[in-house]
Each structure stands twice: as C-alpha cells, then as structure tokens.
Image (cartoon, helix red, strand yellow):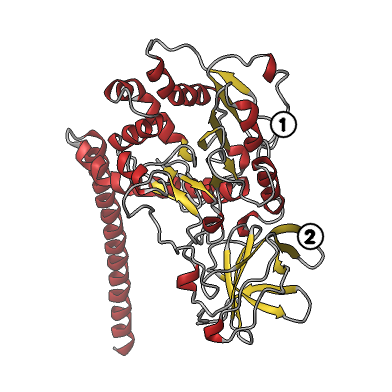
Amino acid sequence: MAFENNNNNNTKLTKLSHISQNLSLSTLWKSIALSGALLFLLHTFAFNHPHKMITHKLFAPLEFTFSSSEISTSSSLQASREPPTNINHLLFVIVGSTKTWRYRRGYIEPWWRPNITRGHVFLEKPPGRDLLPWPQQSPPFIVNKDSSITNAKFKTQIRLFQSLHESFNKASKDTRWFVIADDDTLFFLDNLVETLERYDHKKHYYIGMNSENVWSNSIFAFDMGYGGGGYALSYPTVETLLNRMEDCIARYLGVYSDLLSFRCLADLGIDLTMNKGIHQIDLHGDISGLLSAHPHSPLISLHHFDVINPIFPAMSRQESVNHLMKTAKTDQSRILQQTICYQRGNNWSVSVSWGYSVHVYQSILPRNYLKRPLETFRPWKNVRIPVYTFNTRRVTNDPCEMPRQFFFDSVVEDKNQSLVTTMYKVTTPGSLPPCFPNVNQSAGNISQVRVMAATMHKMGEGIECCDVQNVSSSDTLEVKIRACHKDEVLA
C-alpha cells in the first residue's frame, strides 16, 4: 500500500510539474506578446500619430540640452585656444595733416614699431616734396578720399569717420581693436595691449578717457573719450558704428569728431569705459606735477606736446619724448607709477615716479596728500573753480611742503638678477632751505637718487612701497622698491 501511495504521489507531482512548466511557458509567451504589442503601439503613436509634434517637443528639451552642452563645451575650448590679444590684433587710425606732420612725426615714431605695429596715418591731401620720401620709421600714410560734403569745416569734422571706414575695409580677419588717435599722441604699446587684453573684443567696447579740464568736459561731455588721448573701439563696435554712420553724420553734422563719435555710440547704446592711464592733457605749461603723481594705472598715452613745456628740463620737446621712452623700453608697466616711502631719521618723505622723477620732502607727509599732483601746470581755460577733474596741491614757498626735485637721467637693466636701476639727478642746483619747525636735516646736499626695482612689474597687485637704503655723507640717496607689507601705513 505504501508503495502504491508513493507511485500515486509521484504521478501527481509529475503532472503538477508539467502543468507548472506549461503555465510558465504560457505566461512567458503572453508577456512577450503583450510587450511586443505595447512596443508596436508606442512606435505607431510616436511616429505615425497625427499629433507627433507634441511628442517631438517633449523630447526636444533633452536633445537641446545635450546639443547646448556640446556647443558650450566646444566654444569654451575654442576660447581657451584663442591666443591672447597682442599688438598684431590692434589697428591704429591716426588722423594727421600734411601741415603738421613735419614736426609731429617726432611724437609718433618713438612708439611706432615698423613692420610690427599695424595702421596708417591719414592725410587730407598727398604729401608734398618736403615730406617725401616718406620715412620708413613712420606709419604708412593714406590720403582720405574726397567727400561729397562741400563745407570745408564739415569735411574736417568727418575725416575721422572716413579714416575709420577705410581702415575697417583694409582690416585683416585678426583685427580685434581699432585705436583712434591724433598725430601728436604718444602711446605706450605694451601697456595698451595689456589693458585691452582684459576686455572681450567680441563685445561692444568704447575705451578712453575724458579731459583733465572741467571746462572742456562741460562744453563737450564728461563721459566722452577724447581723441587726443586716444580711444579704442572693439571690432563689433566699429562694425555697428559704420553701419549707422551716414545717419549719425546727418543727425549731428557740425560737431567735432570726438563728440560726433561719442553721440553716435551713445545713441547705439555703447557707453564709454574710462581708463585713467589715457591722458588728453588739456593743460598748459609745466606738467611735471601731474606726471610725478600719476594715478595707480598703467600709463597708456600722453598728448598735446605742442602746448606744454618739454617734460624734462633743459631738453626740447622731441628730446624729452625720446628720453621718456628709454625707460618705456625696459618696463612699461611701472613707468610713472608712484611709490612712497620715508626716511624717519631725517623726517624725509620720498615720492618716486618711476622713470620720470623723484621728490624728496623735508617732512613726513601722508600718501593721501602726496598722491595729489602739485599744480605746476595751468588750466586749458582760465575759468572759475573747480578747474580740474582731480585734486591738486598748490605750489608754495614752504620748504616743508615743497620737494627737492630729481629727474630721470639713465637706466641700467641687470637681466641676470632681474633688477633695473634708474638714476635721477637734480637739474636746478641750489640748496633747499631747511624745514625749521620739525628741526629736519636739509636735503640740499643730495644731488642724485638711485632707485632699484625688480623687472617685469605687473599692475593689478596693488601699489608698491619702498625703503631708503642709504643715507650717508655722500650726495646719493638710494631707494629700493619692494612689495608693501601687510597693513603697511604710508604716513
């Protein structure tokens, strides 16, 4: 009986096993069939349904996000591969005249680098025999084409636009910036290139500076880039400006070219980006006070050499320009940068305008006072105050407030030690009266100052400080420029 029961149980188990297998296979085939049906319906709905665009839109954000990411990454890689702005990316548009080029070329040739600097000087008519053969060290010239405007005054005022248009047509595909200037503008190219590198040349930029003179700004505009100091326009800015050039000239015919450019650009929504290193120099007389207290910004340009005194004593204007450019060839980023330090033993304040001058004061004066220029110059127009767009110090006879002045004489660079040494000498012999209230030692015996500094100084790291290295019985004062200590007080 037990054996029969076992046989019966085995038989039942075998049947259950077959049933189970059949059910599993059946379920599997049904699942496959159902899945296939669902996939078929989905395919039909997605690609053959009358409202398939809705489905496409639903998927579009995913596709767009992926595509945008790829494009963004590609653009980023392309931007990272783009070379930094260099002098070959600049095109100079210098508006000159055959009447002035004979003596103004001396302000252009010291900074122009033949076969490197790109651009032209534009003349109102072909140069005569007195200007030919055209010197190789000068920018090549182009004669402006005749204008349909018959009024001679208006012709002069739109020459800038003509020159800019011709430059744009001749520009290479590598041009990023157009630099507009007069034929008596002195540029410091390395500083200019380094400054423009900070801006995106693919965007609209109009970079320049207003006048030092309140009167000039009130007559024209406080936020206008003056052409004498020079201003830079990015490629897109020039393209936009020239597209609307004729309309703008018709709208503002009769105004000066600088003001015409400013108004046209303002109407296009492009405002001036100011840079304190650009100098119109709407001043007269001796500007040594201004150059000895230059703002903390790379020197980019100087202008109006014909109406100011030679910037170095006992030199002509041309000699002065050539003399200043000697230090520019060594370290442009530091030129005219003011550095202040003290010799506490003698109660002296020392202010260095690198590459130009050194002022030694017989009293301790704080930096906030010394950074104001001495008003050695005269205003462009004699008008009521305020005269200038910056604070000044009056020139007095007080030996406690007036400095003993030393002007740049020579420069020596030691590349092995990355050191540059500049010498400054007094040009007006005679002892400075002592500052009696503070019982100071007179600086009258000092006849020259030696300034030592590291080469390849870069702006943007804050001001520099200095130490008076040597004060002996000799006539030489030694100063070493260094990085400022943390929380160092210059007072």
User: Which residue position is annotated with label 2?
Assistant: 412
Left or right of 184 in this view: 256:
left
Q: Position of residue 90 (x, y in %)?
A: 57, 37
Indicate which disc, 2 or 1, sits on the residue closer to the N terminus.
1
Residue at 41% of width from left, 46% of height from top? 211
Q: Position of residue 462 (x, y in %)?
A: 53, 68
Left or right of 104 in this view: 196:
left
Quadrant that contains the N terminus: bottom left
Amino acid type of the residue that numbered disc 1 sits on in the rendered structure = Gln
**Which secondary structure, mark 2?**
strand
- 228 above or below 431? above
57 or 15, which is in the foreground? 57
Residue at 37% of width from left, 44% of height from top? 272
Left or right of 226 in this view: 132:
right
- 359 above or below 171? below
Residue 83 appears in the rendering: yes
Distance from the alpha carbon under mark 2 to that under mark 1:
26 Å
Q: Position of residue 301 (x, y in %)?
A: 55, 46
Residue at 17% of width from left, 36% of height from top? 51
Residue 223 appears in the rendering: no
- 476 above or below 216? below
| Mark sitting on residue 257 | none
Q: Position of residue 464 (x, y in %)?
A: 58, 71
| Mark sitting on residue 137 | 1
Q: Quadrant of residue 267?
A: top left
- 161 above or below 48? above
Q: Residue furthest bottom?
A: 2
